[in-house]
Amino acid sequence: MTEKTHILEQMNDRSREVFRRVVEGYLVNGDPVGSRTLTRELSEKVSAATIRNVMQDLEHLGLLDSPHISAGRIPTQLGLRMFVDGLLEVSDLDQTDRAALEATVDDASRDVGGLLDRLGTALSGVTHSAALVLTPKHEAPIRHIEFVSLAQDRALVVLVFADGQVENRVFSPPPGQTPSSMREAANFLNALIDGRTLSELRCTVAAQIKARRAELDHLAQQMVNSGLAIWDAPEGGEDRLIVRGRANLIDGELPEADLTRVRELFDDLERKRDIAQFLDLTEDGDGVRIFIGSENKLFSLSGSSLVVSPYMNSDRKIIGAVGVIGPTRLNYGRIVPIVDYTAQLVGRMLTDRETR
């Protein structure tokens, strides 16, 4: 028997309703809920003193907390977890929200990054929160690679993919690079492409450099390694995480404590380097997951909540994720179906583009 199951079994109908009313009131306005307020809302007519006793029992169970001696109660992190797992009523997706999300992918463009950017903006707009979109790594076969010198300490690596997409990144080449070594590096890579994806090419390159070390000029070796590494570098990884709608939270009517946590959250987002962890949050398979407070290992410092769902390609492989993040006082019942539908929408969009 889990701790949560044991706690639920200790709660009768009255304590469950009091608990639910406190959490729902807190999620609506962020304020503690008092016994006098509950006497007007409960289906069962009981005295304020009786409700206070129930609230004290719930506090003893670790589900509620009292911020001040004479104030009402607010849910603890455990209380929010219990509410989400056992009492949350998920609403149907609003047709207006559905239309707003679908409008962003009604585009024949093959620019997946641009579409996901617009979808993140739409997701933020309909939830009135900050939206996160982890874009997929481009794993189409490569057609051509080129290195272009921009300055003594700056170069451009250009990848042309078999599906017609082109990606390029600026990076700092190893010291002493010459146009000749850049051409040699590009020729070496292009001879190995043979329909390989970037991940496959990286493995092949490591083996080939080891086997042909004497043949391949040292400068060209450095150029190959640094040119491919830019796709795994932190700055490259950060580009995969799209964050939209920060102003929805900063400008919202939040208590000062929540505003402080939101600012900490955004600082955390700015500092975050290992964005791959965001995808790890969805490792238990498809479907929406909710992380509350310290359960959220990515942004635990800010005490935030994250509602996240993975999306998949045509092979049913998880390649990215979408989510909504903010203070723990989120409208979970409304946001869960929105995030779920957004993830399904992205999956269908990517599948359609793969089959064109």
Image (cartoon, helix red, strand yellow):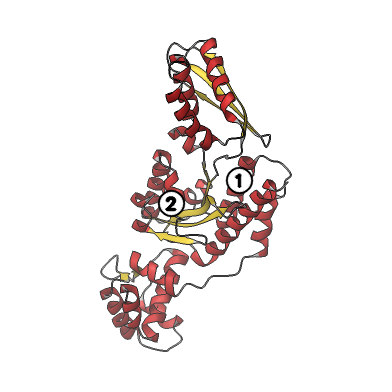
Residue 310: x, y in percent?
52, 55
The answer to whether residue 241 is above or below residue 208 is below
Residue 238 numbered tag: none
Residue under label 2, please give it: 280
Disc 1 residue type (three-letter)? Leu
Q: Quadrant of the N terminus?
A: bottom left
Q: Residue at x 31, y 80 (%)?
A: 52
Relative to 206, is 294 on the left or the right? left
Of the pair 197 and 301, the residue shown nearer to us? 197
* Label 2 crowd bin: few (<14), some (14–19), many (20+), radius 10 Å: few
Q: Residue at x 54, y 21 (%)?
A: 188
The residue most toward the front is 211
Q: Earlier in the sequence, mark 1 or mark 2?
A: 1
Residue 92: x, y in percent?
60, 69
Of the pair 194 and 259, the residue shown nearer to us? 194
Q: Residue at x 45, y 29 (%)?
A: 207
Residue under label 1, please give it: 116
Disc 2 residue type (three-letter)? Asp
